[in-house]
Amino acid sequence: MPGPRPRPASEEIDPHGLYAAVGEFCEWLAVRNYSPRTVVHYEGNLLAFVAWAAERGVTRPGDVTQPMLERYQRSLFYRRKPNGQPLTVRAQVGHLVSLRAFFRWLARARRVLFDPAAALELPRMRRLLPRGVLSVEEMEAVLAQPDLTTPEGVRDRAVMETLYSTAMRGQEAAGLGIFDVDFGRGTVHIRAGKGQRERMVPIGERALAWVDRYLVEARPLLAVPPDDAVLFVTNWGRAFTAKRMSVMVRPYIDAAGITKPGACHIFRHTAATLMLEGGADLRYVQELLGHADVSTTQIYTRVSIRQLKAIHTNCHPAATNTPKVRGIDAIGDQAISADLEQWLATELAEELAQVDTDTDDGGEP
């Protein structure tokens, strides 16, 4: 399926057409303080639909029907990228969500008589588990990789310590300013959060010490005027982008001999998983990660299986090379409950009574 058409000349734009409506919708999003990335994402998805509809002679919102949108949904399923791979389910859902929002806006603005996308069913998305979760030892190996004799190495260690301590996204770390770090309170103010949601998160003493060292030793050597007070700066003295930060982090993960996928998000996944394994309440981890819905955070409970693993080892008969009888060997003396003690006493009493009966009858003991 072809991509969005080039923007036509202004005199060729139908003021009542789909193309003009997409522009108005994106302006409406921007006015309501949606992030620029969100606006660009919606615009790209919607212009792809505009191009697809124009090839079929449909250029106005009122001519779009539900069956047409269902055909477009099927076309997304069969679409192939230049490398021959199909669109991911997430990408398909992104296109359809954009259409639903667009036509809902058109209906509310009385630009169409009804919303043809209202009954559009989205493809089912699999909830994939985070793949890049490190152990404490693996994480420490990664953090030990930067060359601390160089300003870049001190900066990179400070970046990774911040990512690990706060579990923030790479984009959020790239958007930090110098004054967003409160050394006295041990907090970081994340202003560029996902969905334009700001939040305050704690940062550990070790990470603060590395950020302080970076500010004293490395940043003055890397920053160039005019200094916009961004916290982490590149070798050229400018603010990081999320992609550039990932490119910076990944070689250290490779150097530590770790082949798990990911870059900045490895620190986020690892921090969340280890905190849950350490006994942190799910709601607090949700606040740390900045998730709008706790169901998003719950995915980490499916990765954090240390307690389940311990119970499995203790209770499953085939969990170790030593067979267990009724789980007694795995439980241990200190873990035997009062109920289990009562059960053992009852069993022993019944066995003794049976021995006495056999002996009294003159049988063999």
Image (cartoon, helix red, strand yellow):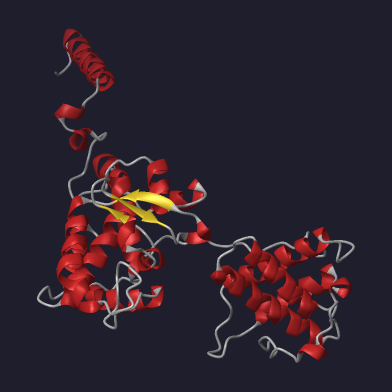
Query: Which of the 4 quarters of the picture holds residue 333?
Result: top left
Relative to 336, say whether 62 is above or below.
Answer: below
Q: Residue, x 26% and y 81% (percent of image)?
A: 235
Where does the C terminus fall, quadrant-wise?
top left
Q: Is residue 117 visible?
A: no
How far across and how far down the image is residue 250, in percent? 29, 76
Number of callouts in the render? 0
Q: Residue, x 36% and y 40% (percent of image)?
A: 281
Where does the N terminus fall, quadrant-wise?
bottom right
How far across and how far down the image is residue 319, in percent? 25, 48
- Left/right of residue 249 with respect to residue 88 in the rendered view: left
Query: Which of the 4 quarters of the picture holds residue 38?
Result: bottom right
- Left/right of residue 187 with respect to residue 352 in the rendered view: right
Q: Residue, x 54% and y 71% (percent of image)?
A: 37
Q: Residue furthest top?
A: 360
- Between 60 and 49, the one lying in front of the other is 60
Relative to 21, say whether 137 is above or below.
Answer: above
Q: Residue furthest left?
A: 149
